[in-house]
Image (cartoon, rainbow, N blue to C red):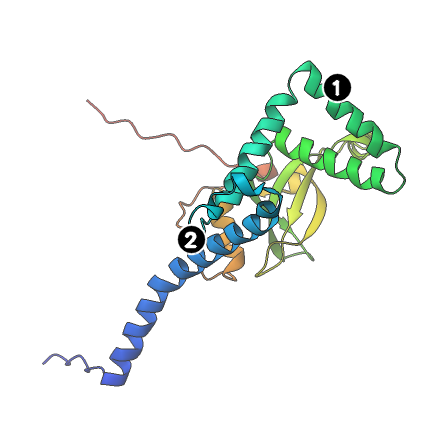
Amino acid sequence: MTDSVPRQSLAMRLRNNFLTGLVICAPIAITIWLTWTFIHWADSWVKPYIPAHYNPENYFQFAIPGFGLLIALVFITLIGFLGKNLIGRTIVEFGDSLFNRTPLVRTVHKSLKQIFETVLKDKGTSFNKAAMIEYPSAGLWSIVFVATDARGEIATKFTSMGKDMVACFLPPTPFPTAGFLVYVPREKLVPLDMSPEDAAKLIISVGLVTPPEEAVPLVAGGERKVKAKARKKD
């Protein structure tokens, strides 16, 4: 004699249907809202500087969302094109010299310029790997994003001590927009096979959204063995 499956009450079925709909609708709604908010933010900054006779909203009876963002993208691309030729480089160097002679402003300008140059130069290698480090104490592990190899004085100091250091970003949960810069010996890093996007989902969801993975054994130094694909026998 088999046990019959208990029937769910109407309230339970409605609750499950509501939660299923929430899972489907919430990500879509939030994505649309964030995109719409960003477009309006960009438009509010750019549109006031567009001459009236170039603004299509003056010829139509409705607003055109994203027009300001489009103008900003075209303007930035044009500046990049001009910055590659001799005249453009001369203008950029003149502007840099003005900023560098201004107290306080030069510190902010130099820092921001160095950050953007470093990030864009290393865009193929920066923050494209997730790893784990033993933090905040022994036996406790945290997810980090590998930024770049240590450079400058920090690299020199630790190289003389026989240590190869790596700069990592340690984000908090559930909002990884702020965090800590930590320098970790390369051998202390445990690299993860998951993508940075999956690692970010894991952090934001407080461990609830776990990406699928295949068990890959670790060897000394945190390196992962490469599993050879089995060949079919003839």
Label number found at residue 90: 1
Decide if residue 133 is on the left or right side of residue 31: right
Label number found at residue 77: none
Q: Is residue 39 above or below residue 150?
A: below
116 or 86, nearer to the observer:
86
186 or 78, nearer to the observer:
78
The answer to whether residue 175 is seen in the rendering is yes
Which of the marked residues, 1 or 2, is nearer the chain's N terminus? Answer: 2
* Residues at marks 1 and 2 touching, judged by CB atoms closer than 8 Å: no
On-image quarter of the N terminus: bottom left
Label number found at residue 62: 2
220 or 148, nearer to the observer:
148
Helix, strand or loop at label 1? It is helix
Q: Residues within 10 Å of mark 1 (few under 14, many from 20)?
A: few
Q: Residue 75's spot in the image, x, y percent?
A: 58, 33
Q: Is residue 44 above or below residue 189?
A: below
Helix, strand or loop at label 2? It is loop
Decide if residue 210 is on the left or right side of residue 170: left
Q: Residue 38's spot in the image, x, y percent?
A: 53, 52
In the image, what residue type sits under mark 2? Phe
**Quarter holding residue 166:** top right
Q: Residue 163's spot in the image, x, y percent?
A: 75, 34
The answer to whether residue 218 is seen in the rendering is no
Spot the residue most to the left: 1
Identify which residue is drawn at 27% across, 79% down: 14
Q: Residue 12's spot in the image, x, y percent?
A: 28, 81
In the image, what residue type sits under mark 1? Thr
Identify which residue is drawn at 53% across, 38% down: 71
195 or 28, nearer to the observer:
28
